[in-house]
Amino acid sequence: MRFALSPEQLDFGTSVRKLLDAGRTPAAVRGWATGDPRPGRSLIRQLAGAGVLGLAIDDEHGGVGAEPIDLVVAFVELGRAAAPGPLVETAAAIPALLQALPDTSLAARWLPGFAEGTEMGTVAFHNGVALDADSAEVVLIADGGQLHTGHRTGLVRSIDPARRLFAVAADESIADDVADAIATGFDTGALACAAQLLGAGRALLDSTTGYAKQRKQFGKPIGEFQAVKQKLADVLIGLDLAEPLLYRAALTMGDATRSRDVSAAVIACGDAAYRAARAALQVHGAIGYTAEYDLSLWLTKVTALRTAWGTPDLHRARIADSLRDDAARQLRGTA
């Protein structure tokens, strides 16, 4: 199985990074957190113009119809920039869910607007909480094999101010007995979240390494101290080891091991990003705690994303269940 990106994918990732760097993303994140979505919506329209929001959407609905690995490339860069908004839901989870339904009318109704960046969507899986339900034009609730439209009922406290969570209640039932489609949407969203975590971890490592080269103690940069070198080396190793698991999950989205591979990627990327966040905070010291310093945008993002698409315990349980099922099938086959 190939775990190296093609030159075209590397170029695409570079172009998305340049777009985000030019879009004053930290200012958009802070605006989003304070209830001003205008800079963020402008950035999202630019991403749509570059094809990012249409990667998981078939061309018949105005998208690109790209492979899951291309979606991963884009979301690594979105995580690296800490981009605001329900991007996982709009560009990954909802398109995968709607296109897996037997009835294509819902996909035809909403996905063209998603691909163009003129509309956004959010979805609540199982827990009745949806991201940015106040600014998304489409609010869905997927639970118990049923899909409903919904509406927000109240704000839910989040550790990341730019992740505005809302309790949602169901309105109209729009699809019944669609558990498989819901599972596809959830796994695609979890895959995109894992990619965001990896990208955020990379950004934290880069900023911390740069800070360690500039900040001086006892007359020399703190990056020259062995303890700091070792801490940052551990972060790099963790991120590098998580990356192949993320790529494998993207490459096996059509296989029977999909859920297990996605869960492995979520755990590995989440742990690596969290280690990067802890190291960043320790190396930066007191300034890392201040909300005015940009580092805080990534620290809170990583902490929130680590459980946004299922806790580590949930994903470990999914892996264990899958391995037990495989073992049981092998035993039946040899009996």
Image (tube, rainbow, N blue to C red):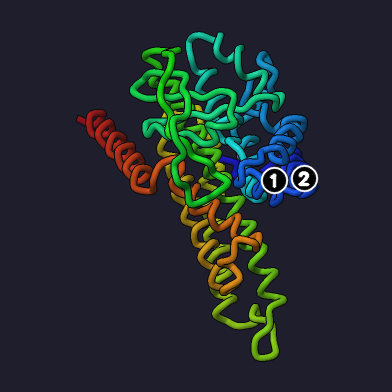
**Residue occupying image coordinates x 36% and y 20%:** 145
Quarter of the figure with the N terminus: top right
Asked if residue 248 is positioned above or below residue 56 in the image, the reply reads below
- Describe residue 123's horizontal placement relative to residue 28 as left or right: left
Looking at the image, which is closer to me, 105 or 285? 285
Residue 83 on image: x %, y %: 65, 45
- In the displayed orientation, state which residue is furthest to the bottom: 218
Residue 207 appearing in the image: yes
Q: Which amino acid does label 1 sit on?
A: Ala
In the picture, measured across the screen, residue 333 lies left or right of residue 194, that is left
Query: Which residue position is annotated with label 1?
Result: 28
Residue, x 47% and y 34% (percent of image)? 130
Q: Is mark 2 on a helix, strand or loop?
A: loop
Assess disc 2: are there few (<14), some (14-19) or many (≥20) residues with their C-alpha within 10 Å of its C-alpha.
Answer: many
Picture coordinates of residue 86, whole percent (x, y): 58, 35
Give the side of residue 209 with respect to residue 134, left or right: right
Dot 1, crowdedness within 10 Å: few (<14), some or many (≥20)? many
Q: Residue 167 carries which label?
A: none
Residue at image x 69%, y 33%? 52
Q: Quadrant of the image for the C terminus? A: top left
Q: Distance between the residues labelled 2 and 1?
A: 8 Å
Q: Of the numbered discs in the image, which one, if any, rests on residue 23?
A: 2
Q: Which of marks 2 and 1 is nearer the N terminus?
A: 2
Which residue is drawn at the image coordinates 67% and 18% (left, top)? 112
